[in-house]
Image: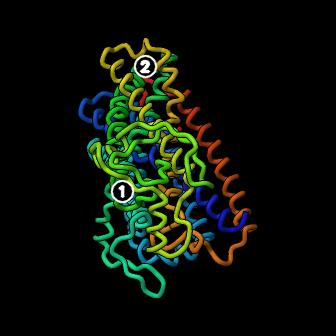
Amino acid sequence: MDALELARWQFAITTVYHFLFVPLSIGLAYLIAYMQTLYVIRNDETYKRMAQFWGKMFLVNFAVGVVTGILQEFQFGMNWADYSRFVGAVFGGPLAVEALVSFFLESTFLGVWIFGWDKLNKKVHLASIWLVAIAATLSALWILTANSFMQEPVDYVINNGRAEMSSFFALLGNPQLWVEFPHTIWASFLTASLFVVGISAYKLLRKQQADVFRPSFNIAIVVALASSLLVAFSGHTQSQHLMEAQPMKMAASEGLWETTGESAPWTLFAVIDPDNQENRFEVKIPYLLSILAYNQTKGSVPGMLELQAEYEALYGPGNYIPPVRTTFWSFRIMVGAGLLMILLSLIGVIGMVRKKIENWRGYLKLMIPVMILPYIANTAGWVMTEVGRQPWIVFGLQKTSDAVSPNVTGGMVLTSMIGFTLIYGILAACFVYLVVRFAKQGPAPAGRASGHESEVLA
């Protein structure tokens, strides 16, 4: 493989790996803040033990997320110099705010939260964890502001071959941002809630610390159901926006070569033949694609071949069809995982309301591996988002092939990719080891929940 192909693989590995930790940090911070709020309001030590136990999980995840984020920045500088030069004047503003304001706000108040147990006023200490959660959300906002420009460039000028921001507030008003940001935040709540559900199910099966893990499960399963539905609705809004902003991505995600008739069916399954630009076998659901795209049973959806001709007229000769199989199946993996999470969360809420959940041992056993489902859905969603935009790295402005560093060789990229992958493997092993260890340990015994930082970090 040449330097471009290797750089793309390294970008995929570092980005996907980093994004394994980001959603859990955002969502878990809010769950911890809610648990601690109940402690402050009710003065019930059980909620304090819950907040401290899940806080340990949060700290491990946060630490690994920071390290993986730093490595991701390294690969940007090494492998994508032309891309960095092209968008630097646009991305500089939001990324600077993310690093200098949101991340430092998050880190500062996380330190206050860790070391402030029983040293600060309860309400002041509670405010610190809420500020951590808000700062984590703002970090996501600034990062997605940059990513949204890659998907749908707005309010820019081209000077000396570089994109320059014409209005910071217009960048924040990017329509792509306001369909992408809610979808990501709700997915973060879903990731965190099923993480809590899975570990709580493990402990309830073993009848260990049920006084802590029963309310943990109950809180998390309700959040899981609500957030899974919100993910679905926000994803639907995002797919409708794709019809305007990136119709080629929409067509590729449906394996749609030819423009549909007045009513567009949704393809459940297809054997895609990209070489001959056709599907050899399809299973379709009538009208569903029109409903997804337009909220009505009638509405034609343009196919990839028609869009290819339009893009050639607009951008010049070239292949503007993304990798269809990857885009098509990543979308279906994401949707399938999402529907399964809605169903399982609904069952869990029913069990909680009937107060029978601890008797449903088969369900509790199932919810342990279900912790993986949000990660599968998150990864598939990002793969569809990034691969479906190809051949562009900034849609309509810069192709991926023009963004790679000109002086970096394939050997250089391969060496750094091997090094990063080894580091990621070590970090993954440490993360799994600590999560399993803390899960087996459980929270501090009743009556011994202390604010001392050594017990929070033990």
Q: Amino acid at mark 2?
A: Ala
Check if mark 2's residue and mark 1's residue have beta carbons within 8 Å: no
On-image quarter of the N terminus: bottom right
Q: Amino acid at mark 1?
A: Met
Q: How is the image coloured?
A: rainbow
Query: Residue 367 versus residue 331: which sits nearer the camera?
Result: 331
Residue 126 vertical position relative to residue 347 in the rendered view, above or below: below
N-terminal of the pair, mark 2 or mark 1, is 2
Q: Position of residue 76 (x, y in %)?
A: 57, 67
Query: Residue 156 versus residue 226: which sits nearer the camera?
Result: 156
- Of circles 2 and 1, the one toward us is 1
The residue lying at 72 percent from left, 72 percent from top is: 409
Query: According to the image, label 2 marks what residue?
Result: 210
Q: Marks 2/1: CA distance?
A: 48 Å
The residue lying at 72 percent from left, 57 percent from top is: 418
Residue 455 visible in this rendered orientation of the protein: no
- Left or right of 225, for residue 407: right
Q: Image quadrant of residue 157?
A: bottom left
Residue 322 vertical position relative to residue 445 in the rendered view, above or below: below
Residue 243 tag number = 1
Q: Position of residue 70 (x, y in %)?
A: 56, 61
SS state under label 1:
helix
Query: Residue 378 versus residue 199: which sits nearer the camera?
Result: 378
Q: Position of residue 127 (x, y in %)?
A: 29, 47
Residue that sits furthest to the right in the current view: 411
Residue that sits furthest to the bottom in the current view: 160
Residue 257 tag number = none
Residue 215 vertical position relative to residue 251 in the rendered view, above or below: above
The residue lying at 52 percent from left, 20 percent from top is: 365
